[in-house]
Structure formats: C-alpha cells, structure tokens
Image: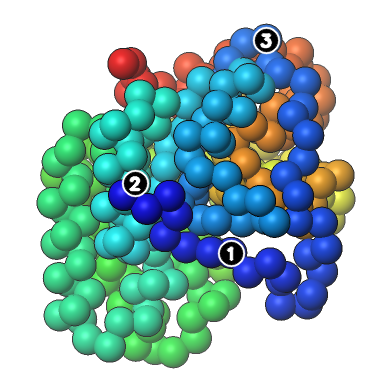
C-alpha cells in the first residue's frame, strides 16, 4: 500500500503558501478527543508524513483517533485498507461531489458508486462521505445533475448499511437540506467543515444533524461559523481538521494535521465559555455516538 496517493500543491492558486513545514506540537489535551474528518492519503509540506507518523503525533497531542475520508474510489479503497489495519482509524468512503461532476457518463459514475457500496460493508468503514453538493466549483448543468444523482445514491447506501453520512456542502445549503428531507436522511448526518449560518444551524439542531467545525472557525471573517457554534446543542457538535487543509490561525497556510486539533478545540471552548478539556470530552462522546467505538 502506498504511503500517499495524492500530492497537495506546494503553493495555492494565489501563491500564498510560503511556510511548508509542519507546525510544532501544541499543548496536549488532558481529555482526549477525535479528528472526525482528515485526508492522510495526501502528501503535503516540505517533509511529508505518512499516516503512522501523523497518528503518533496526534496521540501525543491527546487525539485518540481519526476518521480517514475518501473522495474517489481509489482513495476510499486506501481509506478502508488503512482503517482495517490501524485501530486508531475508522474510514469514510464516497465519491466527492466535485469528482462526481467530472465524470463523462452517468454509467461510469454509477460503476464507481457501486464500488463504494462494496466498501461500505467493511467493519471499520463507519461513514459514507464525503458526499453532497458543491456549486462553488461546479457550474455546468450536467455536473450539477451528476452531483445530485451521486448524493442521492450515497444517501441510500448510508441507509442500507446503517452508516453515518458525512456531507460536503458548499454554496448549496438549501439544496442539500431539500434533498435530505425529500429522500429521507440517515439516522446520523454530519455537516463536515460546517460552512452555514445560524439559519442552517437551526435546521441542523431541529433534525438532530451534527455540525463539524474545522480550523476555519478561527479566521476573523468567519463570524457566522462562531455564531452557528454557539447556537448548536453541545451534543451535536464535532471537531475536525480536514487536513492537510484549513489549518487554524495563527498557522494558516502551513500543512494541517490531526495533532493540531487541540488548537481548534481550545478556540471553540473559549467561544462557548467552556473549559477546553470539558469540551474535548463532550466532542469525544459525540464522535463515538456518530461512528461507534474505535475499540481495538
């Protein structure tokens, strides 16, 4: 099995990535929690780490485990394979909405979604995701149609296997909610890298859907994320890195990793007026409620 199957560009489109080294280990959490969305198959930085190195550092920081997330059939197979061999990982498998939009035919898309359904039966595959709708990067009508088709098929797979659903939702809040209501949501729904406002948070709270916050909640302009966090019931919030992306301030632009979760947890705790370790324990309980035990 390859250590990585993707490589992140060392500079973003605007050329802003200058510091390519991984940050120092933050102060560990005294009460452990989980990174519920990460992409360890992606090599990043001037000295890329393999998933074992990532997890070793994460454990030093008080991170008990992570959900490794696929976005293509290939990366979903990789995710399922590493989760089957490492007790610190669970897997989520799916065709990302932006990937779904790139298929030339629906038949080819369906063939790969069938492959996702095959992976869904593995014991340490605990979620279908990330799936959903993304109208920020997809403008063509065929691309949007393929995204809708893929999303609905993934929802059904999650229900068929009683798995959590991890949703990627960008510039498509109303359409994602409409789809979930129309076709029927699985029992456990997670809005990964939550990007909505208070109105979407109210809908999530009403339906018992989880909101997962990443490092971008620390960015000054994202007050809507901080407002949404405060509105959500504490038993419906999660934390993630979406590594190697969305590194929290003041480390933005550098490679992200599960061991940096404590920075986001402490920021969230300050916003909520909570002790960081109390919040960390709550987040751990919430994460296990969604995905089940990591238990060896």
The answer to which quarter of the image holds residue 31 is: top right
Instruction: Point out residue 252 in the picture as x, y percentages from the top left corner.
Output: 79, 52
Q: What residue is disc 2 on?
A: 79
- Find numbered disc 1 in the image and state the secondary structure of the residue it sits on: loop
- Find numbered disc 3 in the image and state the secondary structure of the residue it sits on: loop
The answer to which quarter of the image holds residue 215 is: top right
- Can residue 168 be seen at all in this image of the molecule? yes
Q: Of circles 1 and 3, which is in front? A: 1
Q: Earlier in the sequence, mark 2 or mark 1?
A: 1
Instruction: Tell me: residue 142, above or below residue 81.
Output: below
Mark 2 Cα within 10 Å, few/some/many (few <14, many 20+)? many
Q: What residue is disc 3 on?
A: 30
Instruction: Point out residue 19 in the picture as x, y percentages from the top left corner.
Output: 82, 56
Mark 1 Cα within 10 Å, few/some/many (few <14, many 20+)? few
Quarter the C terminus occupies: top left
Instruction: Tell me: residue 118, above or below residue 151.
Output: above
Instruction: Point out residue 105 in the picture as x, y percentages from the top left corner.
Output: 22, 86
Q: What residue is disc 1 on?
A: 8
């Amino acid at each position: 099995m390859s250590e990585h199957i993707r490589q992140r560009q060392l500079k973003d489109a605007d050329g802003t990535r200058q510091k390519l080294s991984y940050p120092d280990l933050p102060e560990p959490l005294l009460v452990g929690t989980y990174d519920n969305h990460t992409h360890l198959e992606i090599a990043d930085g001037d000295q890329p780490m393999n998933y074992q190195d990532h997890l070793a550092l994460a454990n030093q920081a008080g991170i008990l485990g992570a959900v490794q997330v696929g976005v293509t059939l290939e990366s979903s197979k990789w995710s399922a394979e590493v989760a089957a061999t490492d007790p610190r990982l669970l897997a989520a498998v799916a065709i990302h909405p932006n990937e779904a939009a790139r298929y030339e035919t629906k038949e080819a898309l369906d063939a790969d979604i069938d492959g996702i359904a095959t992976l869904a039966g593995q014991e340490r595959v605990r979620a279908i995701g990330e799936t959903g709708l993304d109208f920020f990067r997809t403008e063509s009508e065929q691309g949007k149609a393929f995204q809708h088709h893929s999303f609905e098929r993934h929802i059904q797979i999650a229900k068929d296997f009683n798995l959590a659903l991890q949703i990627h939702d960008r510039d498509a809040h109303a359409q994602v909610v409409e789809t979930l209501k129309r076709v029927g949501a699985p029992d456990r729904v997670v809005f990964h890298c939550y990007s909505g406002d208070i109105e979407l948070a109210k809908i999530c709270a009403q339906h018992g859907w989880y909101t997962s916050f990443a490092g971008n909640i620390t960015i000054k302009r994202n007050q809507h994320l901080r407002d949404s966090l405060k509105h959500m019931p504490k038993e419906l919030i999660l934390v993630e890195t979406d590594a190697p992306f969305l590194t929290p301030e003041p480390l933005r632009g550098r490679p992200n990793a599960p061991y940096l979760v404590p920075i986001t947890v402490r920021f969230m705790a300050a916003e909520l007026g909570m002790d960081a370790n109390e919040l960390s324990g709550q987040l751990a309980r919430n994460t296990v409620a969604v995905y089940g035990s990591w238990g060896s």
